[in-house]
Image (tube, helix red, strand yellow):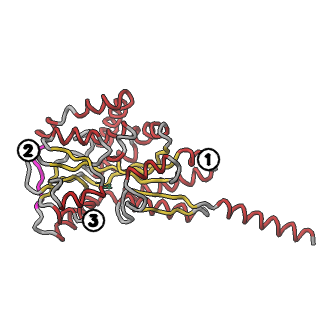
Amino acid sequence: MIGKSVKFFVLVAFFMTSYLHAAEWKYAMGEGISDPQGIYASKFKEYIESNSNHTIKIYPVGTLGEESDIMEQVQAGLLQFIGQSTGYMGGTIPEMDAFFVPYLMPTDPEQLDRFFKNSVAINDMFPKIFNKHGLELLAMFPEGEQAVTTMEVFRSPADLKGKKMRVMPGSPLLVETYKAFGASPAPMSWGDLIGALKTNMVDGQENPTVWIEAYGLDELTKVLTYMGHNHFTATAVANKRFYDKLSASDKQLVRDASAAALNHILQEAQNLDALGLGRIVRKNPDYKIVTLTEEERDVFRERASHVEKVFIKKAGKSGEAIINQMKADLKDAKK
Ligand code: 6CS
């Protein structure tokens, strides 16, 4: 009899601990569930929930505030994870503005795939920098070439003179870049952009085509221009204190879930540019698509060539090391 009751209590204890061990982790992001950050987060959630008793509650953009709000919340430990666009991070982590040195990031999907998979800067150097800000970097991934939407065709810096161009609000380098491009940069959160376009508070903005199409920015502007100047990068981040306190098996679980989600989104990312442009052309056949020639791009490249020095001045030695490593990694990814 005693044997049976001991067995019963052991079983109850086992289930209680595994049940007690089950946690609900909060994951907020700067995009919707069907956008690239949502694709990553859904895969991450699927992996965590199929390989543990833990659950992930995903908060899409706007449910817990803007992108800048969720960064504060994850640093405070109110959230365990966030998906964040790099354009909101330069103010918190100066080195992150490296992603906004114009004409540094490539636009070729295969080169980007190899870069994000193998980059020493991304996989070894940035994680240490994130740790200094109480964050655990889980992944970085591409969302598509930055396409510029305006009301009129532009082909030179002179054409952009006086044009108010919205830029993401967390990147001093984006301001420098659009000044160099001849425009008047207007840092603004995503939540204010649609209204600003409708009231002509801004004349244009930049985003990948999947985002432009998903949120109808092609309905609010007249021209989409490929300048070849940048690529949209996103991150997945955990609160460091939360991550450090996890058991070894839960740390491995989070790492494996991040890897599975990264592989998935990198695969999807191969087609995001074509998918977004295809949808725009089908939905809005009169929308004007312009691709600047190499000569036209060289003029913008030359005008913005000093922006890298501005970055190194702001981000210091650590910034210089990062940008040099990114260049080496991008060269390797070209092979
Ligand atoms: O332009 C923005 O602010 C938004 N664009 C994208 C592609 N993702 C989220 C971000 O907030």
The CB of the residue at mark 3 lies under 8 Å from ligand 1: no
**Mark 2 burial class by Cα count in 10 Å: few <14, some 14-19, many 20+:** some
Q: Residue tagged by mark 1?
A: 245
Image quadrant of residue 16?
bottom right
| CB contact under 8 Å: marks 3 and 2 | no
N-terminal of the pair, mark 2 or mark 1, is 2
82, 199: nearer the viewer:
199
199, 226: nearer the viewer:
199
Tell me the SS state at disc 3. Answer: helix
Image quadrant of residue 36?
bottom left
| CB contact under 8 Å: marks 2 and 1 | no
Residue type marked 2: Ser
Q: CA distance from mark 3 to mark 2?
A: 28 Å
Quadrant location of the N terminus in the rendered image: bottom right
Residue 181 visible? yes
Q: Residue tagged by mark 3?
A: 214
Task: Report whether 154 appears left or right of 168.
Answer: left
Residue 277, compared with residue 99, is above or below; it is below
Residue type marked 1: Lys
Span shown in magenta: 288-297
